[in-house]
Image (cartoon, rainbow, N blue to C red):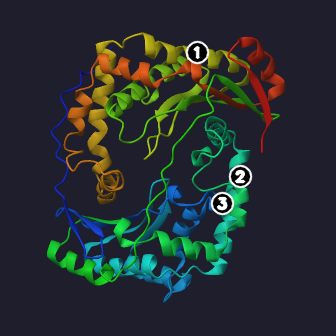
Amino acid sequence: MIARPPATAPRPYQFPYFERRGLENGLTVWLIPLHDRDLVSVHLLTDAGAAAEEESQAGIASLSAQLLVTGTERLDAADFAEATERLGIDVSSESSWDSARAGFVALGEHLEAGLGLLAEMVLHPRFDEREFDRLKAERLNDILQSRADPGRLADESFLRELFADGVPYRRLSAGIPESVEALTVDGVRGFHATRYAPNVAHLIVAGSFDEAQTMAAIERQLGSWSGEGPGHREIQPRERGGRRVVLVDRPGSVQSELRVGHLGIDRHDPRYFPAMVMAALLGGVFSSRLNLRLREELGYTYGARCSFDPRRAPGPFAATAAVQTEVTADAVRELLGQLERIRNEEPAEKELAEVRDFLIGVFPLRFETTAGIAGAIEPLAVYGLSDDYWQTYRAQIEAVVVADVQAAARDLVRPDDALILLTGDASLVRGELENAGFGPLEVISAP
């Protein structure tokens, strides 16, 4: 047998040069010149994510963002689509918890034309009532379809059971049926009028362009944008706490979906890099402990993972797997055992080195396209990370040692307080879960 060749040192990589400028109206502009590229990617971010909406309007940020690509005051949906096709521009818009984004990818020669369409989208959206009704119906249908999918149902149920009443993170950022059903197109217009403003916005341009000409074009297209957005609300997550076992009954399920976790960290936590390396070692790469144990050694699942979801406020930490029904309790036991092990047993230096090398090795791949590079600026803009964040990223990963991983695990992994949520057939798994001694079992019906 031929031995696997040893890994070599990662090739040097330097994140592209960028600079930050500002318009008089408060818009922050990030320019990343990449003169060897044909395409230009432009991302316009504003503080109009789900964290900016009232809970009575949960989902309005998502619908508002989606509607931006359905026309402008000047162009209806068909005319807008024709304009983008004529220029060969790929336009998109979406939202997350912490921001909303509209953007496009185009050949450099169409940059200003694309900026003009982007400005129309954001400053003068059409918000057509028929398009609103269509997207609203699609969103409601998507929620129903997601609840028919055991994995997506488990994700939604995990959040609802993890966070305390009144915490926005209890639900998905796109809303719940009751709140989405109550949304109106006038509500969308009001949300847009108060939340889309230059003082809480960032424009990112990555690709081949002339900086002076591009700044002049940005000034022409977006310099007249006015208004002042209030920004996001401060979310203070609270978990329900204590070891709980919740089984969401899905009669006839042939698998059980597992979600085990608790409150995690925010994006500014000083333990961020040790936490990311620890999570990768535990369940973030193919050779991770969870995957090796539950998939490779026991054959319980096609894959097991874990991750943190850091936001402006602490998001969830969760370990996940879909397992055969007959091994449900055993899989939970094994998963909990790996959470205990990462807390109590230092990883071997070789094991840690392989994970670090993987994270460092794949690091440049995310920046192969102009869209990837523009996307890399987003956390700097949204979370105020330092301008040298990507230049020092590899060094931060390399600096994580065995003691850092175990310290992060002891601080941030709490199996004794974890929520254990499952979706599956209660008639088949309830008895073994009750007998397993994981904690008090609550069986609930799927929504």
Residue 145, label in figure: 2
The residue depicted at 19 percent of the width and 27 percent of the height is: 8
Distance between mark 1 and mark 2 Cα atoms: 31 Å
Distance between mark 1 and mark 3 Cα atoms: 40 Å
When asked about the image quadrant of residue 106, the answer is bottom left
Nearer the viewer's eye, disc 1 or disc 3? 3
Q: Looking at the picture, which amino acid does disc 2 mark?
A: Gln
Q: Is residue 33 visible?
A: no
Q: Is residue 142 visible?
A: yes
The residue depicted at 35 percent of the width and 81 percent of the height is: 116
Residue 336, horizontal then vertical, whole percent: 57, 17
Distance between mark 3 and mark 2 Cα atoms: 23 Å
162 up-or-down from 58: above or below? above
Which callout, 1 or 3, points at the residue further toward the start of the chain?
Answer: 3
Residue 78, horizontal then vertical, whole percent: 55, 83
Element class at badge 2: helix
Q: Looking at the picture, which amino acid does disc 3 mark?
A: Ser
Q: Which residue is mark 1?
A: 334
Left or right: residue 315 compared with residue 258: left
Disc 2 packing (10 Å; few <14; some 14–19; many ≥20)? few
Q: Looking at the picture, which amino acid does disc 1 mark?
A: Glu
Disc 3 packing (10 Å; few <14; some 14–19; many ≥20)? few
Which callout, 3 or 2, points at the residue further toward the start of the chain?
Answer: 3
80 up-or-down from 445: above or below? below
When asked about the image quadrant of residue 188, the answer is bottom right
| Residue that protrudes farthest toward the top in the picture | 345
